[in-house]
Image: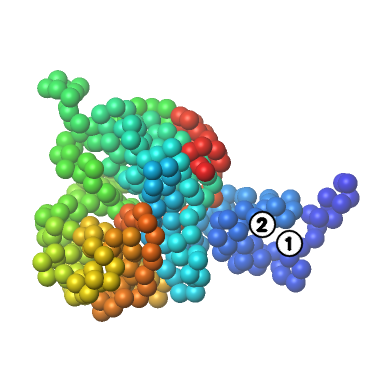
């Protein structure tokens, strides 16, 4: 048996290909589920695909996809919308995980990890690719504003807001930082006016959490390195906006209800806050409503395609529509309970040491179905 094991170790991972090419050009580009199946081939493949440097490179190769979900009374399907060219139709809305014992509501996304708000006012953390799940140690009276990995330590942290409970100094509201897995309580960083961000969704871009409140002339930015807040000018004030990224630039879309139009602005110079009006799209809402049902005015988002073009996702009753920048229908998907989250999912198999230290930690067990 020892000789057989030695022979297995000495043999190339794949006949006809150098191990370096097979590992770093082939295996590293596989989707997570396919890579997990490869681990069952032999011990050598399992060891090669379990090393941390390989898993970090594998995560870097994964596409960031718009996060959708299908919710019903009993479960929630987590769906990364694969709208890339060449993706099979059956794979575009294929769930990567299903959770039961809901309801769940996604409120943050970071490096393939999802933060959910629960019906009992508690919060949980989930990795759909590794099927890890745990409760987050968020004290009562606190709500997460976002999640981030802090450079250069690589610690994963939650930005929290604490609601004031009274006039006493220790009962004042403000912002706090919670280091996951540290066992320490949240640390105050001040900024009591962050209350306006509570229950708003953050967008992680260039090491900062970004929020744009409706009818506001500014974007609030939290620098995850200095852990300080600042403000950024925004060129548009609207009741319904959406932050996104394309080609390394921050973008903001603005929906005009009355005119049924969407304006797309891009930050050509992020540091100097120079914006450019990139697109003005007229949507055939009346025509689409006749065909697909009622339009959900909050169910729209802007996504960047793999070829550098922008596409829009629009929600009509039980339909999700994909529309190009000319307002033309590209694709339609019918699924009851399908919803758009404004988050992105970049799947990861990287192991995090903080996960097992969290309350009610499980792997491949309930609430996964």
Q: Residue at x 72, y 55 (%)?
A: 41
Identify the residue shown where x is 33% and y is 63%. 319
Q: In the rendered view, tell whether residue 226 sits above or below residue 329.
A: above
Image: 361 above or below 200 = above
User: Within the image, what quadrant is residue 251 found in?
Assistant: bottom left
Q: Residue 175's spot in the image, x, y percent?
A: 23, 36
Residue at image point 43% right, 58% down: 80
Residue 163: tell me if it is visible. yes
Marks 1 and 2 close (CB-CB < 8 Å): no
Q: Residue furthest top?
A: 168
Q: Earlier in the sequence, mark 1 or mark 2?
A: 1
What label sits on residue 38 in the rendered view? 2
- Please name the colour scheme applied to the rendered image: rainbow
- Label 1: state its secondary structure: loop
Where residue 24 appears, as percent x and y from the top left, is 61, 63
Q: Is residue 41 left or right of residue 26?
A: right
Using the numbered discs, state the Cα–Cα distance from disc 1 to disc 2 in whole angstroms.
11 Å
User: Residue 265 vs residue 27: left or right?
Assistant: left
At x 29% / y 68%, what residue is drawn? 292
- Give residue 278's position: percent from left, percent from top: 22, 74
Between residue 94 and residue 271, name the one nearer to us. Answer: 94
Disc 1 versus disc 2: nearer the observer: 2
- How many C-alpha atoms fall within 10 Å of the one at disc 1: few (<14), some, or many (≥20)? some
**Could you tell whether 121 is left or right of 220 in the image?**
right
Q: Position of residue 361 (x, y in %)?
A: 50, 33
Above or below residue 94? Residue 142 is: above
Assign a secondary structure to mark 2.
helix
In this view of the protein, which residue sits in the foreground, 136 or 247? Answer: 136
Quadrant of the rendered structure where residue 198 is? Answer: top left
**Residue of label 1:** 13
């Amino acid at each position: 048996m020892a000789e057989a094991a030695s022979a297995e170790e000495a043999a190339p991972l794949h006949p006809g290909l150098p191990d370096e090419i097979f590992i770093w050009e082939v295996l590293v580009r596989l989707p997570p589920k396919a890579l997990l199946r490869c681990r069952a081939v032999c011990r050598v493949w399992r060891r090669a695909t379990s090393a941390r440097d390989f898993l970090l490179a594998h995560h870097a190769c994964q596409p960031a996809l718009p996060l959708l979900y299908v919710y019903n009374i009993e479960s929630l399907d987590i769906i990364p919308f694969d709208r890339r060219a060449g993706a099979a139709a059956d794979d575009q809305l294929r769930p990567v995980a299903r959770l039961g014992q809901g309801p769940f509501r996604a409120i943050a996304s970071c490096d393939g990890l999802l933060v959910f708000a629960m019906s009992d006012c508690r919060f949980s953390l989930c990795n759909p690719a590794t099927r890890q799940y745990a409760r987050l140690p968020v004290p009562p009276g606190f709500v997460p504003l976002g999640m981030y990995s802090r450079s250069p330590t690589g610690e994963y942290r939650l930005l929290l807001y604490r609601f004031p409970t009274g006039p006493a100094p220790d009962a004042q509201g403000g912002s706090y930082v919670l280091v996951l897995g540290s066992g320490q309580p949240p640390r105050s960083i001040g900024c009591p006016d962050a209350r306006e961000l509570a229950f708003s969704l953050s967008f992680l871009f260039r090491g900062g959490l970004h929020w744009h409140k409706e009818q506001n002339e500014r974007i609030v930015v939290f620098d995850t390195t200095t852990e300080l807040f600042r403000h950024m000018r925004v060129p548009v004030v609207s009741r319904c906006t959406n932050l996104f990224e394309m080609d390394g630039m921050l973008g903001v879309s603005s929906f005009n209800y009355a005119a049924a139009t969407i304006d797309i602005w891009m930050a050509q110079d992020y540091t100097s806050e120079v914006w450019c009006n990139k697109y003005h799209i007229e949507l055939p809402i009346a025509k689409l409503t006749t065909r697909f049902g009622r339009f959900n005015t909050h169910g729209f988002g802007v996504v960047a395609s793999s070829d550098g073009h922008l596409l829009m996702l629009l929600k009509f009753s039980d339909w999700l529509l994909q529309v190009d920048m000319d307002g033309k229908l590209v694709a339609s998907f019918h699924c009851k309970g399908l919803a758009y989250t404004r988050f992105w999912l970049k799947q990861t198999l990287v192991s995090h040491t903080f996960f097992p230290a969290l309350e009610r930690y499980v792997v491949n067990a309930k609430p996964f179905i």
